[in-house]
Every structure is written in C-alpha cells, then in structure tokens.
Amino acid sequence: MFTDEQIQEIENASLPDALKLVAEQYPDETVFSTSLGQEDQVLTEVIATHKLPVKIFTLDTGRLFYEHYELLERTNARYKTNIQVYFPEAADVEAYVAAKGINGFYESVENRKECCFIRKVKPLNRALEGAKVWITGLRSEQSENRKDMKMIEWDDDRKLYKFNPLIHWSYDEMTGYIQQKNIPYNPLHDKGFISIGCAPCTRAIEPGENPRAGRWWWEISHKECGLHVHQ
C-alpha cells in the first residue's frame, strides 16, 4: 500500500522520478496501457529510456487506423520495446456483429458501449490480471469526467492503484515535451485528430472544440468507453 507520505513524494517528483518510485514499490507488478496517443508516447519514452521495470501493453480493437500500426512499429524500433498486444475474443466479436451488424455501434449509446466493452474493456481486464499498479496517460484537460481525477487513486473494482502521472500536464506541456525529445507520434494528430480511437468512431475536431468531441461524434454522452470510469 502507498502511504500518504509516499503519495505526496510521488506527486512532487519529476516525471521520471515519479515513475521510478512507483515501479520500485511494485516491481514487475506495474503495468502501463498505451493507446499510442501523444500522452502515452511521452510515458513510453520515459519508461524505455530509464529502463523501468514496467510492462507496456496496448489493445488492438480490430478497427484502428492504419497509422496506429505504423506508429507501433516505429515505437518498438525506436525504444527497443516489445509492446504486448491484446485482442478481443473472436467469439465475442462474431456474436456482436451477428446480432447488431458490423457498425451497430452507430445505432445507440448502448450498442456502442457494448462494442467498447467487447473490444476494449474485456481485453484490458485480461492485461491487468496480477497487476498492482496501472499507469495511464490521462490528463485532467481531456474531458469533464477526468478533471477531478487524482494522480494516484485506488480502483476498487479492479483492486489496484491507478497512477496518472500526466494528470496535471497541459496540452502545450505535452506537445512541447514531444518536440524536445523528438518522440514519434501519430501523424493524424497534425490533421486535427486530438483523441484517436477506432477509425469508425473518431473524427478530426474543429478549432475550439473539446478534445474529446471527435470521439463517438454522432452521440451525446460522456465520451468514455468504460476503461476510465471515475469513481
């Protein structure tokens, strides 16, 4: 368990030191889920260059942009990583498509959440088995649902700590770090795709729009897939 003193030390530390403190507390039980978004590329750079004992994994929903796969290859080559890929269960996808259609998620929020559960949440749960700490690239600026998240919080559903080291970073801080370190990133970000998910569910945003406006753009919702539900 993290004590209040340890949490305060982590919150006041630099990004590399904070990640190191957490990883050393739970070596080989600390995992990082990357979507290969800009935030996650920052964390991958730090974890890899400092050789921290953190398992890095990603989820392949089967509906991602081609640019995502190119970036995965570039990232592994650049940082000598072997990011583990988790896929949805084929039987789940087949049953969903048979019942709802290949693009059934457009029909209702319930259908979309079911698709996200099959393609994201269930594979994530498998990836988190045995973990004590789950590192994420969440930032409070990203959505209303994330503005009150803490840097370290207990996920009672999954019985592990959720560590959000970039929670207080601004968009400009993040992009500045990427430029400074020459970190590879998805070229779709330069075309207005700020938050990138599955290809059928993501569009570029207009100037002044919320960064999450491009996700599930056809519906009115909290713009969350179920991976990061704030307790």
Image (spheres, rainbow, N blue to C red):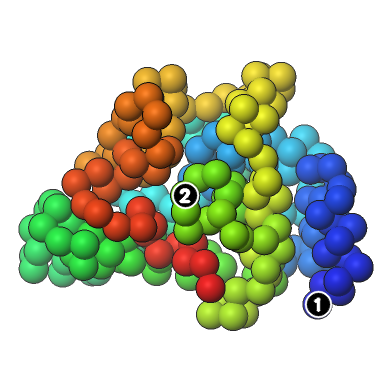
Q: Quadrant of residue 43?
A: top right
The answer to whether residue 69 shows anywhere in this view is no
Q: Residues within 10 Å of mark 1 (few under 14, many from 20)?
A: few
Residue occupying image coordinates x 21% and y 62%: 109
Q: Position of residue 221 (x, y in %)?
A: 29, 57
Q: Is residue 116 left or right of residue 140?
A: left
**217 lies left or right of 164:** left
Secondary structure beneath dot 1 equals loop
Q: Could you tell me which residue is drawn at 79 percent across and 67 percent down?
A: 26
Task: Give percent across and percent down for residue 38.
Answer: 55, 34
| Type of the residue with mark 1 | Met
Q: Is residue 78 left or right of residue 94?
A: right
Can residue 217 be seen here?
yes
For disc 2, the marked residue is 143
Q: Position of residue 121 (x, y in %)?
A: 40, 65
| Residue drawn at x 39%, y 69% as measured from the top left | 122
Q: Nearer the viewer, mark 2 or mark 1?
A: 2
Find residue 145 and report its horizontal and vertical position in percent: 48, 58
Label 2 sits on a secondary structure element that is loop
Relative depth, front residue between 64 and 214: 214
Q: Which residue of the protein is positioned furthest toward the front in this rendering?
A: 208
Query: Gap in Å between the C-alphas at discs 2 and 1?
Result: 29 Å
**Quadrant of the rendered structure where residue 100 is?**
bottom left
**Which mark, residue 1?**
1
Answer above or below: position of 212 versus 188: below
Lower position in the chain sequence, tag 2 or tag 1: 1
